[in-house]
Amino acid sequence: MAEALQPKGIPVAYITTSLFELFKVGPGPSSSHTIGPMKAGCHFMNAARNLDTQILAQAENIEVRLFGSLSATGMGHGTRRAVISGLLGHQPETCHPDVLDELDLNPDQEYPLDLGSKTISFKGSEVIFDEIQHDFPYSNTMIFSLQNKDETLFEQEYYSIGGGFIRWKGWVEPERGEPEFQYSSMAELKKHLVMSGLRLHELILRNEKAITGLSENEIVEKLDNIIMVMERSVEKGIQTEGMLPGPIGLHRKAKKLYDKAKKAHFQGPGFLKGLNAYAMGASEENASGHCIVTAPTAGAAGVIPGLIFVLKRHMGALTEEVREGLIASAAIGFLAKNNASISGAEVGCQGEVGVASSMGAAMMAYARGYRFQITENAAEIALEHHLGLTCDPVGGYVQIPCIERNAMGAVKAYNAYLIASSVDAAYHMVDLDKVIKAMADTGRDMSQKYKETSQGGLALSLIEC
Ligand code: SF4
């Protein structure tokens, strides 16, 4: 999930997000409910260890209160175990899923937390699922407190703002390099492309180097690792059968679809079955809490990997073409994050699977050699037809409607690419900036019931039936 919506009338800042803040490796099933809280837990422990030794000497316990959709659906999304793993020092990129599975077995289990000069014990039940409605500046708020029995010794308010990003009260934007090309909209980005004569992926790479200080080789290496993790999530998903974790009792479907697609040699409906299988395979891995790449979020982690599999396996795309397509897709994710949100808790699923589909359509067009205008049009078409999409995960689990929704997002992305690349670009009437604005406005007007709280929509009707 992602950054809060910009209040009306306040100009948006230019984009300084890195590729590797958008594409992050970590455990599913929801970046704002797992990766964000894990990072917050880790950050809090580091801050606590730096407290005065006299304060630490009095510390007896830590309490964590979860608000907003973290409270509403955190149980199903594995937020408690994510918080505990963060407190224990685990990082999303390196934490093994087995560690997380074990943390969830017994909420009363005690864990030793290392405060440097002393160790205190922490129980899973000290993660409190608090108010869903609140006045904090971000929906997904967490309050971590270091306490003794009489008072709170140290407290920090964290926000999981989507896509695994966190902030905290008093957070100051970290110093980073200035992007070489400053833009906050597609219109401004387009001007830079025209003036510089650069291709889209070249411009984004130049900005990435300026923002992060990484060399081009380092960026390429990291991107290839991202693509490899995405492919692995699909491969594992299409080979695995059985039931997904949680009380819903949902069976995995990706392998069956894949077997049918293979039998049909991926011809006719077999091609679409294949694409569905790939997207659902990665999404089922996400639902299992296994390693995925946020693209742009964990809930939407199946769309882009599914399309990458199609590009490489069925369209003969080279690694370099896929990499360039992925970089182009990031430009769409940056714009959506900067000018609206990529958070289901902020704007509903239009910001997650909708943006993933839009990024995926751009990636398809760009990797197939289409230039900027077709790429933008493909992204626009895919996002336009996700506007208004709510987030209503049944039982708070990223399973229904999320897994099939990833497949639908991938199919829509493929279709958007087909439409954009088949018709005259000059006749295209809606630009991407307008559809991103429409997504932000729609998200602002959307009832809280449909923003990852499981208090409306399918989350209710399925249970009532
Ligand atoms: S419905 Fe969409 S936004 Fe909500 S949890 Fe599922 S994938 Fe994420």
Image (spheres, grey):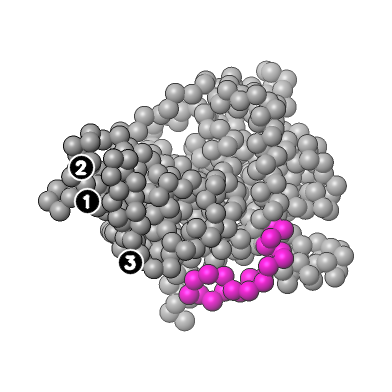
Frontmost residue, 34 versus 5 = 34
Q: Specify the segment rendered in magenta.
A: 234-254
Of tags 3 and 2, the one toward the viewer is: 2
**Residue positioned 31% across, 56% down in the render:** 122
Frontmost residue, 114 versus 291 = 114
Specify the principal SS of the magenta part.
loop
127 on left or right of 459? left
Frontmost residue, 389 versus 101 = 101
Residue 352 visible to an observer of this rendering: no
Q: Position of residue 260 (x, y in %)?
A: 79, 71
List the residue tagged with mark 3: 108
**Residue positioned 73% across, 49% down in the render:** 308
In terms of sequence position, does the residue under pointer 3 or pointer 2 come before the other?
Answer: 2
22 is higher (above) or lower (below) than 237: above
82 is higher (above) or lower (below) than 55: below
Q: Please check the rendered image and state whether residue 237 is part of the magenta-colored stretch, yes or no.
A: yes
Q: Which mark is residue 57?
A: 2
Per the model, the C-alpha gap separating discs 3 and 2 is 25 Å
Q: Position of residue 347 (x, y in %)?
A: 46, 51
Q: For the residue with label 1, is its CB less than 8 Å from the closest atom of ligand 1?
A: no
User: Dot 1 surroundings within 10 Å: few (below 14), some, or many (20 or more)?
Assistant: some
Q: Are marks 2 and 1 in contact (CB under 8 Å)?
A: no
Residue type at mark 2 is Ala
Q: Please check the rendered image and state whether residue 460 is part of the magenta-colored stretch, yes or no.
A: no
Q: Position of residue 102 (x, y in %)?
A: 47, 63
List the residue tagged with mark 1: 60
In terms of sequence position, does the residue under pointer 1 or pointer 3 come before the other?
Answer: 1
Q: Quadrant of residue 452?
A: bottom left
Frontmost residue, 120 versus 34 = 120
Residue type at mark 1 is Glu
**Residue positioned 38% across, 49% down in the render:** 87
